[in-house]
Image (spheres, rainbow, N blue to C red):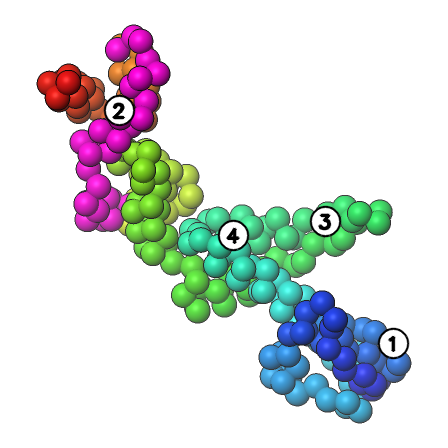
């Protein structure tokens, strides 16, 4: 079996279509093309072509997963969940089902992204704590609960919650300034603040300070 054509894709100049014995067989990004040493006229066995098709799948999945990681920092669990969804068969607009990728392939992509530093639960925890509801306010308890739900280790969460300059007192003031006018009943407002993860003592003190300022 011989490589008979290598053409740049019209929609993505970073990918090429590879034809074998006159028929399209697979696509690769240009870096894979160089790394794999694919050239016009080079001959392969069927098993070797199948292996190249797996490399094609790997390249596509790695690119999509990298784009996902670059949207914002993600936890390891978030990335594993994202990759798991790629193993599921999905319906196509033209009918039929698109077969999901293998678990082995998703593990390979995950390991590569972790190796490159795109996935790091410590960096994710710092990002989440310092940016989550920055203007609206979030209690440390709520931030802790959210990070736990995203699979971040408890030791990591506690470490960066201690180090952050955000305090429940200052976060409470943000929420009170935005939400208090919506509540005619102070008890209901206090219950709302408690559901956001703040302690009763902190809530009472914050509301008393607000009354004194008025």
> Label 2: which residue?
176
In three-dimensional space, the C-alpha distance between marks 1 and 2, rounded to whole angstroms, equals 66 Å
Q: Tell whether label 4 touches label 1 (CB within 8 Å).
A: no
Residue density around tag 4, few if under 14, some if 14–19, many if 20 or more, within 10 Å = some
Q: Label 4, on which residue?
A: 80
Residue 60 visible in the snapshot: yes
Residue 23's disc number: 1
Sooner in the amino-acid sequence: mark 1 or mark 4: 1
Local secondary structure at mark 1: strand
Q: In 3D space, how far apart are the residues under numbered discs 4 and 3 (Cα atoms)?
A: 17 Å
Is 100 on the left or on the right of 70, as rendered? Answer: right
- Cα distance between the residues tagged 1 and 4: 35 Å
Residue pushed farthest right? Answer: 22
Q: Which residue is painted at 64% across and 53% down in the image?
A: 86
Q: Quadrant of residue 192?
A: top left
Which is closer to the viewer, label 1 or label 3? 1
Determine crowd level at label 1: few under 14, some 14-19, many 20+ residues with C-alpha closer than 10 A.
few
**Element on which disc 3 rests:** loop
Task: Residue at 35%, 16% (x, y): give it.
Answer: 182
Which mark is first along the chain, 2 or 4?
Answer: 4
Question: Residue 22: x percent and y percent?
Answer: 88, 81
**Residue on which disc 3 sits:** 89
């Amino acid at each position: 079996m011989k490589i008979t054509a290598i053409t740049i894709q019209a929609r993505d100049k970073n990918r090429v279509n590879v034809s074998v014995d006159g028929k399209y067989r697979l696509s690769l990004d240009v870096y894979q093309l160089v790394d794999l040493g694919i050239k016009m006229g080079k001959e392969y066995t069927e098993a070797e072509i199948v292996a190249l098709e797996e490399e094609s799948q790997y390249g596509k999945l790695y690119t999509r997963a990298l784009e996902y990681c670059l949207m914002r920092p993600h936890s390891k669990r978030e990335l594993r969940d994202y990759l798991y969804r790629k193993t599921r068969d999905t319906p196509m607009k033209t009918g039929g089902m698109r077969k999901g990728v293998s678990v082995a392939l998703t593990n390979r992509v995950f390991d590569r992204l972790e190796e490159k530093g795109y996935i790091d639960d410590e960096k994710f925890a710092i990002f989440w704590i310092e940016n989550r509801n920055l203007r609206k306010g979030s209690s440390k308890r709520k931030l802790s609960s959210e990070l736990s739900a995203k699979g971040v280790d408890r030791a990591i969460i506690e470490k960066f919650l201690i180090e952050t300059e955000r305090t429940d007192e200052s976060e409470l003031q943000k929420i009170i300034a935005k939400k208090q006018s919506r509540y005619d009943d102070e008890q209901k407002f206090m219950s709302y603040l408690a559901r956001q993860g703040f302690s009763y003592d902190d809530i009472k003190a914050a509301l008393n300070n607000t009354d004194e300022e008025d």
